[in-house]
Amino acid sequence: MGKKTLGEKLFDGFNYVFLTLFAFSAVYPFINILSISFSTPAAANAYGLKFIPKEFTLEAYRAVFDNKVIWTGYYNTIIRTGVGTALNVLFTVLCAYPLSKRYLPNRNLYTSLIVFTMFFSGGLIPTYLLIKSLGLLDNRLVLILPGLIAAFSMIIVRNYFMSLPEEIEESAKIDGANDVRILFSIVLPVSLPIIATIALWYAVAHWNAWFDALLYISDPNKTVLQTVLYKIIIQGSPQFQQFETFDPSVQSVTPDIIKAATVMVATVPILCVYPFIQKYFVKGVMIGSLKG
């Protein structure tokens, strides 16, 4: 590799500065919320950038975890994320595998119909009426079934399957394996990168989802954590109204500190998943997006 010219060094320097500022702008709000969640009311209300809590306290987290609504939301979100992601991955694979076979009759027609749904939908009101007519209102299944197969993820998985050597499956068929055995015993073990990738997509989508629960779920015992977070931050949940009578001389937490702690409680678990799947993430997306 030759020595870099002055122009190349300036270009690299500009990129480093730009990316550093961009990364800081993305990370700082998270650090600020984290610092506020561990601060006392006086320190949280002080002006200036907050990177490290000046007066450390766990009162906000104690108040959050003492609230039953938070635990109910946590339970429902974990159930939704676990069951929903498993079903999403299973049905996406079952849909993508036959569509990856060139000998499937009308394969392009089926694929075009699925791609069509990526750009056009029935709209909010028709979707609500459909959910109501199916009897899914206030049912936990409504958080999983309508989005059981994401068209984009299915296309990525289909393309990944198409990139696999056909000789592997042909040799398995000669040995007497049927399509189900080939899919689960041969194709899926060598498709771990794309399976991990779409599993992460589905898990993050389920963990962050709140609008569908707000529309279709009215039972407080079935609501999810993100909806609880929405009600606390945007609407002012009645469960936290006692903090609205804030008096720094008698209160150890404020509504803003409660909101910051709630945001951290809702965000940290899904962030912990990334380091375990990141190594598959780039590889799975790159391979799955090459073949059309």
Image (cartoon, rainbow, N blue to C red):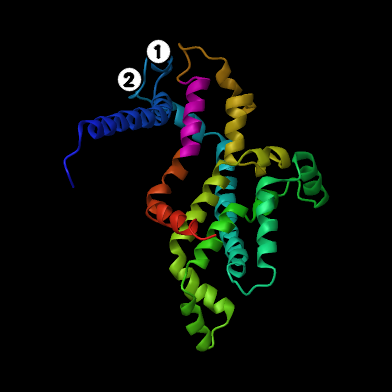
- Give the residue number, with chain letter if any, for mark 2: 54
Report x, y in % for residue 37: 43, 27
Tag on residue 183?
none
The crowd level at tag 1 (other Cα within 10 Å; few <14, some 14-19, many 20+) is few
The answer to whether marks 1 and 2 mark residues whose Cβ atoms lie closer than 8 Å is yes
Q: Earlier in the sequence, mark 1 or mark 2?
A: 1
Residue 38 sits in which quadrant? top left
Q: Which residues are magenta?
A: 253-267
Taking depth in this image into account, of 249 and 112 the one nearest to the observer is: 112
Query: How many angstroms separate mark 1 from mark 2 (CA)?
Result: 10 Å
Residue type marked 2: Lys
> Does any portion of residue 16 appear in the rendered image?
yes
- Give the residue number, with chain letter if any, for mark 1: 46
Q: Is residue 125 left or right of residue 9?
A: right
Residue type marked 1: Ala
Report x, y in % for residue 233: 57, 26
